[in-house]
Structures are given as C-alpha cells and as structure tokens.
Image (cartoon, grey):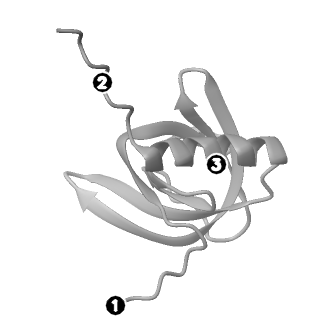
C-alpha cells in the first residue's frame, strides 16, 4: 500500500471546476481538490519552477484566487491535442481564501444534500 504524501486527501469532483492560470489566462479544469492542493487538466504546460496564479470558479458566486506550485505533471497526446494533468500544491493562501477552499472541500466531502421527502 502506498503511503499518502498529502496533508489532506483530494476529493474527486463530479463536475470539473473551471478556472484560469497565469497572466495569459489559460483555461484549466480542476478534477480533484483538497485543502492543500488540486489536480488540474490544461492544454498549457506549467513550469515546475516558481508559483502560478490560479482563478477558480468554485460556484456561480465564488471566484477564488490561489497561488501554487507544480509538484508533478504528465501529459497525454490524443488526436493531435496535448493535455497536461498537473498536481498543484497551494502556497501563500490568504486567510479568507483558505476559508473559501476549506468550505468548498468540506461541502464536497459531505456530498449532496438528500432530496426533501414529498408529503404523501
């Protein structure tokens, strides 16, 4: 069994969270998220050096801005398109942003609310 290296486990997202990275505002799709980082897909290669700035549309009303650095990356070429899958560790989250991310991840862990029962 492999040792878990993350401080907090990533949660698989049922629907990818859209976002953008860097000054060029390249689109990304967040596939997994934890309080400490995320796994994203992008068509833009991200350098493993330095910090990257991300904007994440966590819901219709919340645009979170986070910084992070690449901890691993791989790519797939299919039909002439390169897609990079990148593990990002968050860095320097403001207290406000950390709360937003924590609430988002906690809501994912709890799952969707059960549907209300219809009165018979």
> In the current view of this chain or complex, which residue is farthest to the top?
120
Secondary element at tag 1? loop
**Pair 2/3: label in front:** 2
* Residue identified by numbered label 3: 102
Query: Which numbered disc covers residue 115?
Result: 2
Q: Residue at x 34, y 56 (%)?
A: 82
Q: Is residue 103 left or right of residue 80?
A: right
Q: Of marks 2 and 3, which one's residue comes earlier in the chain? A: 3
Q: Of marks 2 and 1, which one's residue comes earlier in the chain? A: 1
Work out how far the residue at label 2 is from the one at label 3, CA to CA, in angstroms.
24 Å
Q: Position of residue 37 (x, y in %)?
A: 59, 60
Looking at the rendered structure, the number of numbered marks drawn on it comes to 3
Work out how far the residue at label 1 is from the one at label 3, CA to CA, in angstroms.
28 Å
Q: Is residue 109 left or right of residue 96?
A: left
Q: Position of residue 45 (x, y in %)?
A: 51, 59
Secondary element at tag 2? loop
Q: Of marks 1 and 3, which one's residue comes earlier in the chain? A: 1
When asked about the image quadrant of residue 19, the answer is top right
The quarter of the picture where the N terminus appears is bottom left
Whether pointer 2 and pointer 3 mark residues with C-beta atoms closer than 8 Å, the reply is no
* Residue identified by numbered label 1: 1
The quarter of the picture where the C terminus appears is top left
């Amino acid at each position: 069994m492999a040792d878990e290296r993350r401080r907090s486990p990533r949660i698989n997202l049922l629907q990818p969270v859209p976002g953008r990275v860097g000054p060029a505002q390249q689109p990304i799709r967040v596939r997994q998220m934890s309080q400490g980082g995320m796994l994203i897909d992008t068509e833009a290669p991200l350098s493993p050096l330095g910090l990257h700035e991300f904007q994440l549309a966590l819901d219709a009303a919340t645009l979170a801005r986070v910084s992070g650095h690449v901890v691993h990356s791989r790519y797939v070429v299919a039909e002439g398109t390169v897609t990079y899958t990148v593990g990002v560790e968050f860095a320097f989250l403001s207290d406000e942003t950390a709360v937003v991310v924590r609430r988002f991840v906690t809501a994912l862990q709890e799952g969707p609310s059960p549907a209300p029962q219809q009165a018979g």
